[in-house]
Amino acid sequence: MNAGPPASSGAEHAAYPVALQDEVEAYLADLEFATVPGMEGLDEAMRYSLLAGGKRVRPVLALATAEAVGRAPAEVMPLAAALELVHTYSLIHDDLPAMDDDELRRGRPTCHVAFGEGVAILAGDGLFAEALRLLLERQAADPADLLAAARELVAAAGVNGMVGGQFLDIAGDAPADGESLRRLHGLKTGRLIGASVECVLLLSGMSEAETAPYRRFARELGVLFQIVDDILDVTGDQHAIGKPSGSDQRHGKATYVSVFGLDRARELASESHAGARAALAEAGGRTAKLAQVADYILTRRR
C-alpha cells in the first residue's frame, strides 16, 4: 500500500469547510491591538503576520468541534481566534535566524525580514498576550470551564507542549526513531492542534468519557499534519507551499521522511488519517466538517 498525499501535483484537494475559514478571516481582520500612540509599527507587524492567509486549520477545527457537539460555531469564535494568534506567534519566532532562519512564509517575506528581528520578536510576544486577553475578555462560558480551556491553551503552547517540542527540535539530540519522532512532534505540532479540539470540549463542560473519541481524533490529526508537512518539505513546490522546500534537510532535522523514507511516510499518513476518521465515526455528532479537515490535511499541497 502506498497511499497518502497523491504524487501528482494536479490532484484535486479534498473539500474544506471554507465557510468556517471565511468567518475566521473576517473576525481576525476586525481585531484591534495597539491603542497607545507610538505603537503603530508593532501593530502593523502583528497584523502583517496574522492576516497573511492560510487555511486557518486550528480555528476551523475549533468551530467544527463546536458544531459536532451541538454548539453554534460562532459561540467559540474568541477561542478560535486566540488559537490562531498563538499559532501565528509561533510561526514568527520559528522563522527567526536563531531558529529556522526562513525568509519566506506564505509567499511573503517573513516578519523579521519585513520589520527587523527585534520587532518580530515583540510581535510574536504581543500576539501571545493578546490571545489570552481575547480569550478571557470575550469568550462567554462558565468561569470554571473558561479557566480549564485557558489552562489547556497555555499548557499546549508551553514547555510541555509546543515550546518544549521546538526545544527538542533545535537541540538536535533527540533519538531518530519513530517513537521519539512521534513524541517530539506530538509536542511541537500536535499539542496546539489537539487544543483546538480539547479547549472547545472543556468550554462545553462535557465529561471525559463523552469526549474521548474527539481527543483520539485530535491526537491522530496532529500526527497526520506533521507527517504531511515533512513530505511536503521534500516533494512540495516552493511557490505552492509559500516557503523554500528542503528546510528540514538543510538543518539536519529528523523527519518522518528521513527516518522512514518517503513511501513509508505516505503509508503512515494514511494510517493516521484512518485512525482520525475511525475516532470520528465512534464520536457520532455532526462531524462532517471535522472529517473534511482531516481529508484536506491528508491531501494538502501547502
Image (cartoon, rainbow, N blue to C red):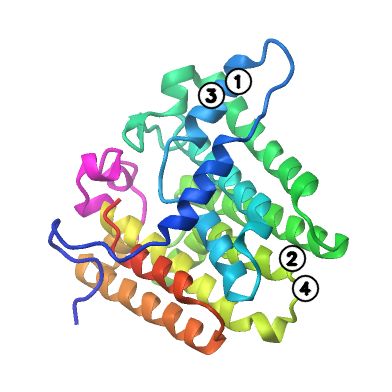
In the rendered structure, the answer to whether residue 21 lies left or right of residue 9 reads right
How crowded pointer 3 is (Cα within 10 Å; few <14, some 14-19, many 20+) is rated as: many
State the residue in front, 12 or 103: 12
Residue to which mark 1 is pinned = 42
| Disc marking residue 203 | 2
**Outermost residue toward the right?**
143
Q: Are marks 1 and 3 in contact (CB under 8 Å)?
A: yes
User: Could you tell me which quadrant the N terminus lies in?
Assistant: bottom left
Q: Is residue 123 above or below residue 13?
A: above
Q: Position of residue 233 (x, y in %)?
A: 28, 50
Tell me if I can see residue 158 in this picture. Answer: no
Whole-number angstrom distance, CA of label 4 to CA of label 2:
5 Å
Task: Work out whether mark 1 precedes mark 2 in sequence or the reverse, and give the earlier one.
Answer: 1
In the rendered structure, the answer to whether residue 170 lies left or right of residue 214 reads left
Q: Position of residue 131 (x, y in %)?
A: 68, 42
Q: Which residues are magenta?
A: 233-255
Q: Nearer the viewer, mark 3 or mark 2?
A: 2
**In what element is the residue under mark 3?**
helix
Look at 59% across and 66% down and name the residue there.
197
Residue to which mark 4 is pinned = 205
Amino acid type, label 3: Ala
Amino acid type, label 1: Leu
Look at 14% across and 56% down and name the residue there.
9
Q: Is 246 in the magenta?
A: yes
State the residue in front, 166 or 54: 54
Q: Are marks 4 and 2 in contact (CB under 8 Å)?
A: yes
| Disc marking residue 143 | none
Whole-number angstrom distance, CA of label 1 to CA of label 2:
32 Å
Look at 64% across and 47% down and name the residue there.
82
